Image (cartoon, rainbow, N blue to C red):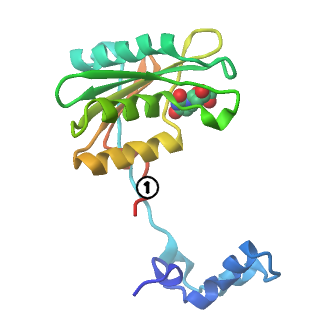
Amino acid sequence: MSSIGDRNSGCSPKSMLPIFAIYNNLSFSPLKRTECKDNKKMEKTHTISYQEYAIEELSAEDLSLLQAAIKATATSYAPYSNFHVGAAVLMADGSVVMGSNQENAAYPSGLCAERTALFSAAAQHPGVAVRTIAIVARNPQGTLAPACPCGACRQVMSEQELRQSEKMRVICYFSDAKILIFEGIENLLPFGFDM
Ligand code: THU
């Protein structure tokens, strides 16, 4: 059976003890972590991949989804950040669901555009896979600004992929000259949480 201490590193669980001790506010020295002699064993690399397009290189389907996301920014409620985010989801049955960020005076009660769109899509089209989500943002000046999903939205995308056993594409608008497309959430959230 593997434990946190021996999972990737070859370190003994005993050598990890000081880390937990710090969290428990005890006075062990973090330097004791160097008890793990072969530190090189812990280092692994992870590659992510994405494609970069100019707007005129997008397929008609992707361009139309991006335009839907731009349209969705008009429904954003963002009186606190003045940052208007729009998302559009293309479902496997061809339907498009739009979402925008919805803020609240109690800040954490608000929701990002991506999750508004994804949760709405799941509620309105249960059991239908999400093919692609496009994301755009407008800065307080109203100009389109680079938009890439936050960590919480990536986690929700990751779970949606698990639900549908199908990879999801993510289109992030940075500028007309730079649109990033990720094929699968693994490229945005390696080692996402799952139970
Ligand atoms: N926001 C999104 O809608 N999506 C993201 O991925 C990151 C941030 C929203 C939340 C908030 O209303 C505003 O942008 C500023 O953070």
Q: Position of residue 133 (x, y in %)?
A: 34, 29
Is residue 114 left or right of 92 when viewed as pictured? right
Residue at horizontal 68 percent and vertical 33 percent from the top: 107
Q: Quadrant of residue 20?
A: bottom right
**Residue 92 found in image quarter:** top left
Q: Is residue 192 visible?
A: yes
Measured as percent of width and height from the top left, residue 27 is found at 83, 81
In the rendered image, residue 54, in percent from the top left (x then y), is placed at: 36, 18
Question: Height in image: 33 above or below 61?
Answer: below
**Residue 170 position in % (x across, y down):** 35, 33
- Can residue 176 be seen here? The reply is no
Position of 60 with respect to 155 (left or right) is: left
Query: What residue did someone put label 1 on?
Result: 192
Front-most of residues 89 and 139: 89
Name the residue: 79% across, 81% down.
29
Of the residues shown, which amino acid type is indicated by label 1? Gly
> Which residue is at the front of the view, 8 or 119?
119
Q: Residue at x 51, y 79 (%)?
A: 4
Which quarter is ligand 1 in? top right
Is 16 placed left or right of 6 in the picture? right
With respect to residue 78, does 52 lie above or below?
below
Near-viewer residue (53 or 25): 25
With respect to residue 44, does 99 lie above or below? Answer: above
Q: Looking at this rendering, what residue extends furthest in the right direction?
A: 27
Q: Nearer the viewer, residue 111 or 47?
A: 111
CA neighbours of label 1 inside 10 A, class few (<14), some (14 to 19), many (20+) = some
- Classify the position of the C terminus by image quarter: bottom left
